[in-house]
Image (cartoon, rainbow, N blue to C red):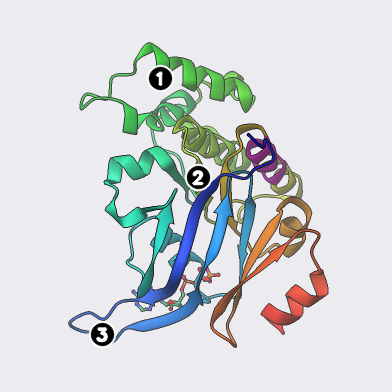
């Protein structure tokens, strides 16, 4: 076996992203995302102007929207054929803002990541508990273990949300603007943490962001929504920053 061989995770086959026709509205096509492949160990930034379709792309990958054309394959299986629980074992999602919930501790939040593996009563097995402890340890969150999620700073809460996704033990993680509400130091801390997770766990991680310098600094791939040509364009590191900015924002 070639240890440098990359493991294919997601494959966009002839994909068109947008909103399907409904009884009341016409179909809206946003862009082509044809024939892109994503592998284990890819840290991918999705960039594009406001309203270009980053969230729509994520919602399509998450299975909440159907592609207008084509399909998304996960390890060569059609992704849409997988049940919600099966998908949750392969894919975790971190929203850009989580305000915290009264009485929900950091431990409880991270334990929620085990939901795809627990029974109807959500009882944690000893294996679930050891995964939660491992994540608390890995993210240096043990000192906040019993802290209420309402009483964390934005940065701490974002890292706790990443912990919930990590506890899900999915190969793919999607984070919608994970640094949008963070200060300069916490932005770097979160991106560095994600870069580390990609390397150590060999996961596939997608983020969306308007902070191009962060994406250039930490990601190994950028997929940019070119709103002139209505297509998704792939760039691999090392990035030609000027070319990317010109193509997407000028
Ligand atoms: N249900 C819908 N039907 C039709 N168009 C929609 C629907 N929801 C959103 N849109 C439009 O789709 C486009 C893409 O929106 P989306 O939220 O995916 O963009 P975005 O790149 O994530 O934006 P931002 O950077 O501002 O968060 C926008 O023009 C939006 O108005």
Residue sitting at 52 percent across and 21 percent down?
A: 145
If the image is split into quadrants, where does the C terminus sit?
bottom right
The numbered mark, 2 or 3, whose residue comes first in the sequence reads: 3
**Magenta highlight range:** 190-199
* Numbered tag placed on residue 18 in the rendering: none
* Numbered tag placed on residue 25 in the rendering: 3
Q: Disc 1 vs disc 2: Cβ atoms closer than 8 Å?
A: no
Which is more toward the observer, 192 or 144? 192
Position of residue 22 measured from the top left corner of the image (x, y, whole percent): 22, 79
If the image is split into quadrants, where does the N terminus sit?
top right
Which residue lies most toward the front here? 1
Q: Would you say residue 66 is visible in this rendering?
A: yes
**Horizontal relation, residue 59 to residue 120: left or right:** right
User: Residue tagged by mark 2?
Assistant: 172
Q: Is residue 32 above or below residue 76?
A: below
User: Residue tagged by mark 1?
Assistant: 128
Residue 193: name its quadrant: top right
Residues at marks 1 and 2, CA–CA distance in whole angstroms: 19 Å
The numbered mark, 1 or 2, whose residue comes first in the sequence reads: 1
Residue 134: name its quadrant: top right
């Amino acid at each position: 076996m070639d240890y440098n061989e990359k493991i294919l995770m997601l494959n966009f086959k002839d994909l068109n992203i947008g909103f399907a026709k409904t009884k009341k509205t016409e179909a809206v096509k946003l862009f082509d995302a044809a024939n892109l492949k994503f592998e284990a160990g890819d840290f991918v930034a999705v960039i594009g102007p406001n309203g270009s379709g980053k969230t729509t792309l994520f919602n399509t990958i998450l299975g909440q929207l159907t592609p207008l054309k084509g399909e998304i394959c996960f390890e060569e299986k059609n992704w849409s054929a997988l049940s919600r629980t099966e998908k949750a074992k392969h894919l975790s999602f971190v929203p850009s803002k989580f305000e915290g919930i009264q009485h929900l501790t950091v431990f409880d939040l991270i334990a929620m990541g085990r939901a795809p593996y627990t029974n109807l009563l959500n009882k944690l097995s000893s294996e679930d508990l050891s995964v939660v402890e491992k994540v608390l340890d890995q993210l240096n969150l043990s000192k906040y273990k019993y802290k209420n999620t309402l009483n964390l700073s934005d940065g701490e809460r974002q890292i706790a949300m990443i912990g919930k996704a990590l506890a899900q033990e999915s190969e793919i993680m999607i984070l919608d603007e994970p640094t949008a509400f963070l200060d300069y130091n916490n932005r770097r801390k979160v991106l560095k943490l994600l870069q580390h997770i990609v390397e150590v766990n060999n996961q596939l991680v997608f983020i969306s962001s308007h902070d191009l310098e962060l994406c250039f600094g930490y990601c190994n791939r950028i997929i940019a929504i070119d709103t002139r040509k209505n297509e998704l364009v792939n760039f691999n590191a090392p990035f030609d920053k000027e070319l990317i900015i010109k193509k997407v924002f000028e």
